[in-house]
Amino acid sequence: MTSSTTPSPSATVLGLGGCLDYETVWDSQVMTDLARDHRIGADDLVRGEMIASERDLVRSILSFVRDGVGGERAVSSHDVVEAVASRHERRVTLGGSSVRAALAMSAVGVPSTLHLVAEDDNVRALLPPDVEYICSRDGDAINPHLIMQFPAGARVELADGTAIESPRANRLIYVCDPPNREMALADELGDLLAGAQVFLVSGFNSMTDQPLLVRRMRDLRAAMNRLPEGATVVFEDAGYHVPGFERIVIDALADRVDVYGMNEDELQAYVGRKVDLLDPEDVASALRRVRTIVTAPTLVVHTQHWALAHGDAAATMTAALEGGIDMASARYLHGDGLDIGRLASVREVPRQSAGEQFAGGLADVLGAEVSCVAARELVTDAPTTIGLGDAFVGGLVASLATGVADGRSS
């Protein structure tokens, strides 16, 4: 690992932000106490946009838990994050889509180079040796993100005597992070991209200043002009802290992105409604709607039931989809214990029958413009839901990078 301005050449560059996470252990009693402390009843539950107080944060968490939905929100002060995080058992880990993707890749022997916007002793200690990095910020400055992971059946009693119960496991992210909000780009990014064959772009969802976001898009495009001919650019979407900013990013990068990825929550946000993920006609309708917004050659959507690629080159993405599903499956079962052996063992796990039925039905509806792979049938008493999308991206990028290195089509 190095933060020098001349990192070793890497075929895979992952960016653009990174962070520390407070990974909390779910505790229904703590959340019940918080609901009562703040006199929060069923009518008070709202996800919110900008979280301005501890009460707002608790209301938001419980609203997501009630619906079993994952998401990300901005918080006005890190003190608000600390107030709730301090009530839970927690551990400090590395976070951010690109960083978690790099960790998953490293666990199975695929090196990479990160672009970071902040670092500290935790970052330097926790990044593995085969993950090099550059950083756009001088000096240490990191505010941990609050990660709430809740299980299916999580039950919280509210102050009005009612209770909520989560229909499924999921994770939430709450952020007050100036470096990621500013997303400064390192001067040496262009030099790094000059040797890249795969470039992952993520992290702009944290930005809240529109003129600054526009400038960052201009600077990123300039750096991307250094990419070699034939390099693959993968963009991974996320929950934007300012609604509408996703359109600025899409419009700025659409002609430079080869693979545009998102999860089921982001898919539903684009279409503005709940999508039945096991109904081929409903998903096909949602894809057609998203394709009027996202014009990248290939759209990738990854969910709890399946992962798909949509576009003219969809058929070439099957191996990458499988790589993403298997990496995410291994993380779901083993968390940070993911390694090559456990990744190999997950490939022996049968696929979901409902997912396979859906994949066949979707192929009947969309034909050759789609490739869909069913998720694994995973059973564990201690699932990891934090970082599953990031692990999927790591598996997909690793498959693309390996294919490039081996001279094979992905």
Image: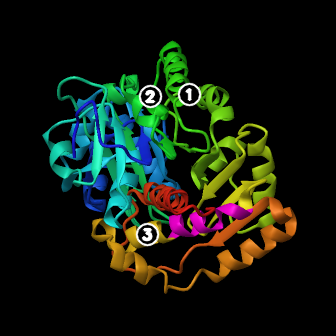
Residue positioned 60% across, 68% down in the render: 319
Asked if the magenta segment contains residue 317, the reply would be yes
Quick one: label 1, few (<14), some, or many (20+) residues within 10 Å?
A: few
The amino acid type found where label 1 is placed reads: Asn
Is residue 163 at all visible to an observer of this figure?
no
Q: Position of residue 350 (x, y in %)?
A: 55, 86
Looking at the image, is mark 3 or mark 1 nearer the viewer?
1
Decide if residue 343 is on the left or right side of residue 32: right
How many numbered circles are shown?
3
Q: Secondary structure at mark 2?
A: helix
Query: Which residue shows up at 79% across the image and 53% down it?
Result: 312
Residues rendered magenta in the picture: 315-325
Contact between marks 2 and 3 (CB within 8 A): the answer is no
Dot 3 lies on which element?
loop
Q: Earlier in the sequence, mark 3 or mark 1?
A: 3
- Amino acid bearing label 3: Gly
Q: Is residue 104 left or right of residue 276?
A: left
Which residue carries the number 1 mark? 225
| Separation of marks 2 and 3 at Cα, in angstroms | 48 Å
Mark 2 closeness class: few <14, some 14–19, many ≥20 residues within 10 Å:
many
98, above or below 194, in the image: below
Residue 313 in sight from this viewpoint: yes
Q: Position of residue 300 (x, y in %)?
A: 64, 54
Q: Earlier in the sequence, mark 2 or mark 3?
A: 3
Q: Nearer the viewer, residue 148 or 359?
A: 359
Which type of secondary structure does the marked residue at label 1 adopt? loop
User: What residue is shown with label 2?
Assistant: 190
Q: Position of residue 78 (x, y in %)?
A: 26, 31
Which residue: 60% across, 47% down? 266
Evaluate if marks 2 and 1 touch, with contact meaning CB atoms under 8 Å apart.
yes
In this view, the residue in front, 29 or 91, is 91
Judging by the rendered image, the residue that carries numbered circle 3 is: 153
